[in-house]
Structure formats: C-alpha cells, structure tokens
Amino acid sequence: MKQFLIKFFAFIIPVVVLAYGADLVVSHFLKKSNQYVQGEYSTWNALYDKKVDSEILIPGSSRAWMHFDATRIGDSLHTKAYNLGMDGYNFWFQKYRLELAMRDNPHPKLIIMSIDAVTLQKRPDLFNPNQFLPFMLENDELEKISESFLGYHGYDYHIPLIRYFGKGEAVIEALKMVFNDSEPKRVRGFEGQLKAWNYDFERVNKQMDSFTVPLDPTSVRMFEDFLKEIKQKKLNIIFVYSPEYIEGQRFVKNRPEIMALYNRLSAQYQIPFFNYSNDPISYDKKYFFNASHMNKLGAELFTTKLIQDLKTLNIQY
Amino acid sequence: MHEAKNERLRKFWFWLSISVNLGFLGYFKYYNFFITSFADALSEVGIERHFSTLQIILPVGISFYTFHGLSYVIDIYKKKIVPEKDFVQYSVFVSFFPLLVAGPIERATHLLPQIQKKRVFNATQAVDGLRQIMWGLFKKLVIADNCAQYANMVFNNSGEYAGSTHFIGMLFFTMQIYGDFSGYSDIALGTARLFGIDLLRNFAFPFFSRDIPEFWRRWHISLSSWFRDYVYIPLGGNAVGMWKRIRNTFIIFIVIGFWHGANWTFILWGFVNALYIMPYLLLKVGKHETSIAAQGKIFPSLKEAFQIVTTFTLASMSSIFFRSKDIAQSFHFYKEMFSASFFQKPEGIRNDLVWIIILFLIVEWAGRENQYALEKMGFHWPRPLRLAFYYVILAAIFLFAGTSQQFVYFQF
C-alpha cells in the first residue's frame, strides 16, 4: 500500500506543482489572440494594461462594438476615443469595463453611453465565457462582478488551470499564439461588419410575432445610480441610441416603455439623448446585417452623422 | 428455499422471491407503461377510459440491482450456491457501490466468493484499476459527452438538418452510448479492483465485431449473458428446433429491449436486433464465437474491414429507436436521414472532435486483444514514454471534456 501511495503521489504531484506555471504561460499566449472570442481580448488587454488612454469612452453592447468607429470619432474631434462595446452583455459588465477605463483616466471629457432595448436586461449566464479565461486568476473584481452569472465558480478564480477544464479549444488557440501573431479584429474597440442581411430576423419572426424584453429592476437601479454618480463628478455623458432596423424596433413589444424610461432619465439628469431610431438609416435594410446590428456601411454612415452631432455639444477636448 | 422440506415448497419460495423482485421492478418501472398502453388499446376500439398513473421518481439503477438480486435467487434455486448467512457480506453483494447504479449485472457465483474471502491489498491490481478508471473517464468525459452535444443537437431538432447531418448524428449517438456506458463500466471495474474485487467484464470492443451475433457477445455482456443463462437456455437454448430458436431469439431481444425502458422504442430496438440475428440463425453463419478481428495483426483484411463497418452501421441504425422519445420520432428521423439531402455536406461537425474519435478508435483497436484498451499498452515502452502517454491522456481528459451529461444508463 505504501509503495502504491508513493507512486500515486509521485505521478500526481508534478501536475499540481506545474499547474501555476502552466496557467501563466497559457494565459499569457491566449491574451495575444485577436481572432478568438470575437476579438474581445484586445479590449480586455487595453483595459487591464491601462492602454485605453482616451478622452471619449463608449460603453455599450455589441451594438456599440459594431457601430461606433472610435478612431474616426477621435480623429474628427482632435482627441482619442475608445469603444468599450462588449458582445452579449448588458449594463452590469458595460459598467465594469467603463470603470476599468476610468481608472486610467478618471475624468474623461465625454462618455457616450450606447443604449438599446436590452441594456437594462440581465442575462442569467456568462456569454462567450472564454473571453475571461486569461484574466481570471486571482482577479477578485471580475469574480465579484460575475458571481451573479452562471458560468464559473469561485474556485475557478483561485485554483490554477482548473478553469481550463474542458477548454481544449482555448489552450490550442494559446499554443497557436506561441508561433503566430494574429491580426487585430478590433481597432480601438471597433470592428465594422462586412456582412449582408442574414435573414435571422425573418426566421425568428416566423416563430413569434413580437418579443418582450424583461427589464431587470437591479440593472435599472444600478443604471440610475451610475448616472447620479457621473453627474456628481460633473462628467459629460450622453445617451446614443444608434440606428436599429425599423422592423426590429416594432418586434420589441415593450420598446415604447423602454424608450420612455430613457427619456425620463435623460430629462431628469439633463443628459443629451441622440436617438437615431427614426433616422433614415433605420429604414434601409442595406445598412444592416440583422435587425439590431448595422453592417460596416451603416456603421460608417452613422459615425459620420454622430460626429456632426457631437460637434454641437461644444466640448473642448 | 434452500432449507425447504420438499420440491414443491422450494418452488413456492423460488417463485415468491422472483415475483417480489419483479414486482418491485414492474411497479416502479412498467406500471405506467402498461396502464397507458391498455388505455390506448381501449381507445382504439372506442372505449375511452382514464386510468391514474403513478407520479413517482424511478429509483436509479432499479433494473440493474433487480437482476443482480434475481441471479442470487436463481443460483440458490439451481443449487449453484448456498445462501449467504452473514448479513454484512450479503449486503455488500447487493449494494457494492461501484456497480449499484449501472452494473455490470453481477452473478452471485462470481461476486459472493470474492466478498467472502479475505482480501489483501494488491498494488499491481490497484494500479491496473486506476489505469482502467482513467480510460473510463476518457471515454465518458471526452468521447461520450462531446458526441452527446452533437447527437442531442440533431435528435432534438430533427427536420432542421440535412440527411447527412442526421447520419452523422446517428453515428455520434452510437459513439456516445458506447463511451458513456463502457466508460462507466471501466470506472466501476477499476474502482472495484482498488478493493481487490474483479467484476464481470461488460464490453469487449463491440465496434470491432464482424457480425451482429458477435456484436451482442461483446456489447453489455453482463446483461446479454444474464438473459442467455437465465432465460434463453431454460427456454431450450440451441438444443431445440429452428422455429423454437427463432421464437426464443425474438423473446430474448424483445425482453432485453423492454429491460431498458418502458417504451415501445426499446421494444422495437430489441425487435430490430432480433431481425438482424435471423440471417445468421437461418443460414447458420456468424461463427466468430471467440476470435478477435485481425488477431495478431495490425490491420484487418479488406473483408474484415467491410464486415466491421457494416456491423457498426447496422448497430447504429437500430440505435435510432434507442435514442428517440417515441416511435414517430424514430421514423421521422429515418425519413429525414434518407432524404435527398443525404449527400450534402454535414453541418456543425467539430474537427477536433473528429480527430479525437479517430485517435480513440486507434487506441481501442491497438488494445483490442486485452480486457480494456490501456491494460497492457506501453508495457514494453521506456518508462518515461509510458508516463508521458498517461499524462497526455489525463491532459486530454482535462482539456477536451465535453459539457457534463448524465450517464445514459442511470435511467435504467
């Protein structure tokens, strides 16, 4: 029995000892991937490495990521802008990204809050969870912000390598990065989508006539608290509802209620609200690849219009 | 029963014991099936009757330990063993934890003597047990759980995919159920070996069978041999005329199907497998009694390869009944599979999974002459290489484990 136990532990101990080092190596190379997890690593890297370095910050969801060309916005206003858009996430994580960016620059000149019908919804699970993998070890903030989402457990943040269980695809991606550098998908957080209309909307529409977005009361309260805090700090913030295909707008049954909420908050906290819901772009399918996301053509046209509107704010950058 | 004063009394205790065992199984597992089938049959002749069904949770593994217990009773009746008088030893036999929920279905003649004798820790046996557990984990977590994702995608959304995708979904389900159940069996056997107990082998590389009778000698061996010994042979076995053998074969396979679950799909699955056996029975072919495909060789002959692929495809085809929730879904699946889109490129296949399955089959093939694939693999390699091989398997389990899925056979 003694010999057996010695052999058993001699086999297992090297795995345990090397786990921490292996974790660091895998995470180091995985972060370098610009193609994996929809290119989210480039934004996380900029945030954690304090390289956002911008006077204009654009938090939001995938609609922010795909619609706001931060480089053009920054160049046109003779400053720097960064798109913090995060695919599949609502205000909980949008706020976290903004807070990380504001650690580097606590007083940005302008926050362009990209809002939409699902900003104040809360999904139960972590979307695209592999985007967190290289940043999780001993990251208490990330653990706290994600603890109300299904996906990872507390031990995933503290035991080396354990979060890579069943994530062979991510480890293979890290191994690829040992030999290659991948081209960035996102530039200052923005990535225009070279896609034509994909008929997803028609398919969904066949199955249901409309959809009601369940507003999350905690998210609404958190959003309002955030606005109060921004106003107390005397920071400039604006709401932007970027174009959304008109049929998609009609599909959201409680959209009037959601828009009324945004209008109330805009009036109450004196926040300019640039609403492009009825802009001509929203009526033309050629600018979209699905009901809520513009393609690159639409994003560039929208960015041009937004820049003109931003100039009316008379903010000195 | 053992101490009954006359044969009549002995028979009485025997049938009472059988009835009690099967009564529990019938009550928990089959009551609802019979009552709803009866109501459906009445409805067909225009009589509408509502019968209340049981709203109870089926005890996990009830079919396994019922048959486990039946073997004890039958072996005592046949005077192969004497009743165990030590309650602790009997309890260990009945509830030995590695085999409690999904077998293998043990025989009293095999397991009880091992429990009764004094066991001494054997390091070689324990290492072998750990190796088998590791291989079982690989089969379950990597093969079964990953294949399950694809199979579930196709079976749960049949109609949305091309015929070729259905075909791949069917193959992946066959891989899933093999990885799941034989993986569980390996874990159970390996765990038992840590305690110095050898359980009955449950799988003997069934995917390398050259015909359907051979497949059934290699698939869920503890169940098929149970039915052979306790049902088929008492019915006359091979010593009766052809018509009776045909009848007995259908009885055995339909009962095996029914053992799996109270659903017509399982009965049909058993029926189809009985049909598969018929040509071999009628033509008296299928003589691969004990031999192993391409024994002592690296590659099979062209003929053997063809036989293996054909047998695997036939087994997979019948598994559609096993996976479907009802017969209508089974036939819908066949219809979708053999549609014009059969020759389209299948959708949603993960390349990494295909490579993992290929490597898995290579390892299984290389180890097919042993009790399980890894049993003696690498024994002649340098020690560092062998250790590296084990670390690679552990890493593969860690990295490529699929989304956690319940063991399929726990429901039985």
Image: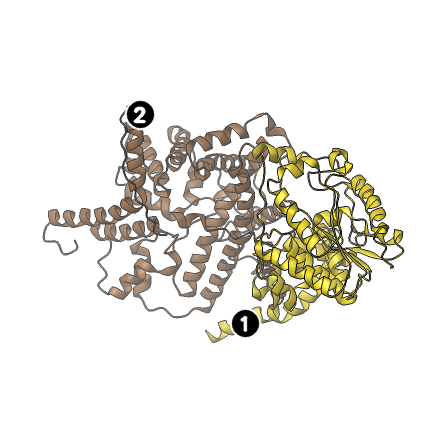
Chain colours: A yellow, B brown
Secondary structure beneath label 2: helix
Alpha carbons under labels 2 and 1: distance apart: 66 Å
The part of the image, by quadrant, that contains residue B257 is top left
- The single residue placed furthest to the top in the displayed view is B45
Q: Give whichever of A14, A224 is nearer the camera.
A: A224
Query: Which chain is disc 2 placed on?
Result: B
Residue ID for mark 2? B44
Q: Report whether B9 appears left or right of B294.
A: left
How many callouts does the rendering have?
A: 2
Query: Which chain is disc 1 placed on?
Result: A
User: Can residue B288 be seen in this snapshot?
Assistant: no
Query: Horizontal and vertical percent for residue B271?
Result: 38, 33
Q: Residues within 10 Å of mark 2 (few under 14, many from 20)?
A: few
- Circles 2 and 1, Cβ within 8 Å, touching? The answer is no
Going by the numbered disc 1, the residue's amino acid type is: Phe
Residue ID for mark 1? A9
Q: Residue B388 bears which disc, if any?
A: none
The part of the image, by quadrant, that contains residue B113 is bottom left
Query: Horizontal and vertical percent for residue B137?
Result: 51, 56
Compared with residue B14, is residue B120 higher up or lower down, i.e. above or below?
below
Q: Report whether A57 appears left or right of B254.
A: right
Q: Report whether A30 appears left or right of A251.
A: right
Residue appearing at x 28%, y 24% in the figure: B46
Query: Horizontal and vertical percent for residue A290?
Result: 70, 38
Residue appearing at x 45%, y 53% in the figure: B184
Going by the numbered disc 2, the residue's amino acid type is: Glu
